[in-house]
Image: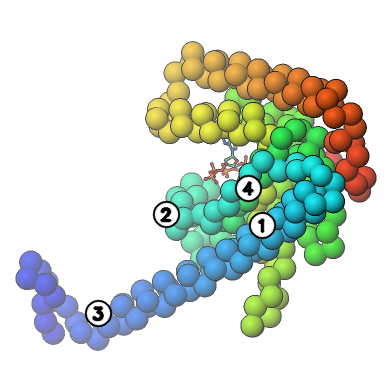
Amino acid sequence: MRNVGTMSTVPVDDEALNQTLTEARELRDEFQRFLHEYEFGMREVETKISILRDEFAHHHAYNPIEHVKSRVKSPDSIVEKVARRGIDADFASIREHITDIAGVRVTCSFVADVYRLFDLLTAQDDITVRVVKDYIAHPKPNGYRSLHAILEVPVYLSTGTIAVPVEVQFRTIAMDFWASLEHKIHYKFQGQVPAHLVDSLTGAAEAASELDARMEQLHREAHGSTLGALPAPPPRIVAI
Ligand code: 0O2
């Protein structure tokens, strides 16, 4: 037995301490392996989107993608969501219930591009669509608009193939601008946003939606059928 650290007077059993440290290291390594799976899945989706973007640029002389952002949820954020949802804190349960650990956000110029890209990505043979939430057709009460899809993508590891869920959010520049501002306001007021700001945000979301429609109309007038000239999409999955 010995005391650990100068401040502590509590006797600590060496063997118990070593056991605890070994378990902590094993848990850390397992958590890293777990997060790597999501990072690989996210990279697979990024590659698919980047290939579509390059193909459009080279062969259709049109780029429907403005920018792409990706992230793997931080350990703190995963732990917070596990607690908020009351999910068992084991890897199997987290795998099953938390489907936005890997996230890719695709910002497009126009609403037509959003649906076109969604169709092209989800038509790929190795992609499985788990859930679609169409917040463009059905905006959230606060005005939030985006098309969300949980896609499952195969990742080929040395130990075999795993199917990794990746949340892909498709939106326009106007939707992205709105969501970014709303997120900052929400953060500033820690969720307790004053009513007048909530109303203003909802009004701004409507203005953004009108802007999207006007910009797309302008684009069609200027470029004729550019949007419609892209490859015909397969049938769209209906909103859930
Ligand atoms: P981050 O860092 O962007 O990932 P939940 O995830 O529990 O909130 P659900 O039903 O799984 O609920 O998620 P949902 O509604 O499909 O969308 C979750 C993500 O969409 C959020 O992720 C945001 O990115 C975005 N989102 C959804 N609603 C809003 C909204 O009203 N305003 C803004 N700005 N973004 C929204 P996270 O986990 O919050 O954060």
In the rendered structure, which amino acid carries the disc numbered 2?
A: Asp
Residue linked to disc 1: 46
Chain-order first, disc 1 or disc 4 = 1
In the rendered structure, which amino acid carries the disc numbered 4?
A: Val
1 and 4 marks in contact (CB < 8 Å): yes
Q: Quadrant of residue 217?
A: top right
Chain-order first, disc 4 or disc 2 = 4
Residue linked to disc 2: 76
Q: Which numbered dot is residue 17?
A: 3
Front-most of residues 44 and 86: 44
Chain-order first, disc 1 or disc 2 = 1
1 and 2 marks in contact (CB < 8 Å): no
Q: CA distance from mark 2 to mark 3?
A: 25 Å
Residue linked to disc 4: 68
> Residue at horizontal 83%, vertical 59%?
124
Q: Is residue 218 left or right of residue 75?
A: right
In the rendered structure, which amino acid carries the disc numbered 1?
A: Glu
Is any part of residue 1 visible from this angle?
A: yes
Q: Nearer the viewer, mark 4 or mark 2?
A: 4
Q: Nearer the viewer, mark 3 or mark 1?
A: 1
Q: Nearer the viewer, mark 2 or mark 3?
A: 2
Q: Which numbered dot is residue 82?
A: none
In the rendered structure, which amino acid carries the disc numbered 3?
A: Leu
Q: CA distance from mark 3 to mark 4?
A: 46 Å
Is any part of residue 169 visible from this angle?
A: no
- The answer to whether mark 4 is within 8 Å of ligand 1 is no
Image vertical order of residue 25 relative to residue 97, above or below? below
